[in-house]
Image (tube, helix red, strand yellow):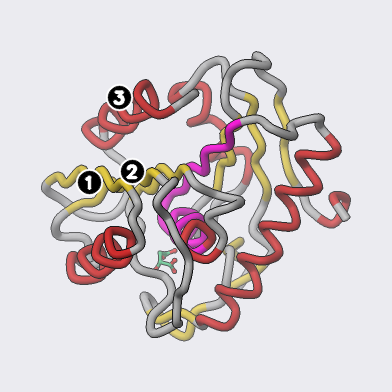
Amino acid sequence: MLDDWIHLHTPGLPDAPVLLMLHGTGSNERDIAGLAGMLHPDATVLSPRGRVSENGMNRWFRRLSEGVFDVEDVVTRSAELVDFIARAREAYGLEGRQLIAVGLSNGANIALATALLRPDVIDRVVAFSGMFPLDDRELDTDLSASAIFLANGVSDPMAPHESVNRLVAALDARGAEVTRSSRPGGHGIDQADFAAAQEWLRQHAA
Ligand code: MLT
């Protein structure tokens, strides 16, 4: 049920995309929704709150320790997000509209997991400080219609370079179009990430 999800919905122009905003650990739907207007002022915004609590911090899936994910839970929560998207599309009349998932950190990781598992539901992702979220999970999906933007700091201990390389290899192997923006520094979003994401959106938003 859509009522099971705390979320924001802000209508935009009908010919602009829907931005699915996915917050990071300890944040919420309001904080991340604030980015949407700067990325695409005409977009419709859907911003749900992650339903996992880690010591009171909102998250999208459980982790065993920092950077070590409970992959079963990633898959389960990704399926729940797919269900949220379907319900929100129906409730808000968004069927047929282009949807672009925009995630930061843990939000980027659930967006990327869903893009890898369900490219029929999420085929456009802007991922800030994301990494490979599915460890050794077998994947048999075709991502040849997907386009993924990755912005990462090259010395990010929370989204290590090797994991981002593994992510890029997994996306490439499944045929996705991958745009990678690397900058000096660590976790989060900086101006360079933001400017590169805006440019990518200019090219990829329908
Ligand atoms: C995760 O758990 O998804 C990543 O380690 C990033 C974060 O701390 O949320």
Classed neighbour count for the residue bearing mark 2: other residues with Cα under 10 Å, few (<14), some (14–19), many (≥20):
many
The CA span between labels 1 and 3 is 12 Å
Q: Is residue 151 or residue 56 the one in the foreground? A: 151
Vertical order, 8 against 82 (above or below): above
Q: Is residue 205 or residue 80 the one in the foreground? A: 205
Residue that numbered label 3 is attached to: 199
Q: Give the range drawn in magenta.
A: 98-113
Q: What element carries label 3?
A: helix
Earlier in the chain: of badge 3 and badge 2, it is: 2
Residue type at the position of mark 2: Phe
- Horizontal and vertical percent position of residue 50: 64, 58
Please name the residue shown 55% across and 49% down the image. Answer: 122
- In which quadrant of the rendered view does residue 31 lie? top right
Classed neighbour count for the residue bearing mark 1: other residues with Cα under 10 Å, few (<14), some (14–19), many (≥20):
some
Residue that numbered label 2 is attached to: 149
Residue type at the position of mark 3: Glu
Does residue 137 belong to the magenta stretch?
no
Please name the residue shown 43% across and 75% down the image. Answer: 134
The CA span between labels 2 and 1 is 6 Å
Please name the residue shown 65% across and 74% down the image. Answer: 76
In-image side of 26 versus 167 (left or right): right
- In which quadrant of the rendered view does residue 46 lie? top right
Vertical order, 176 against 38 (above or below): below
Residue that numbered label 1 is attached to: 180
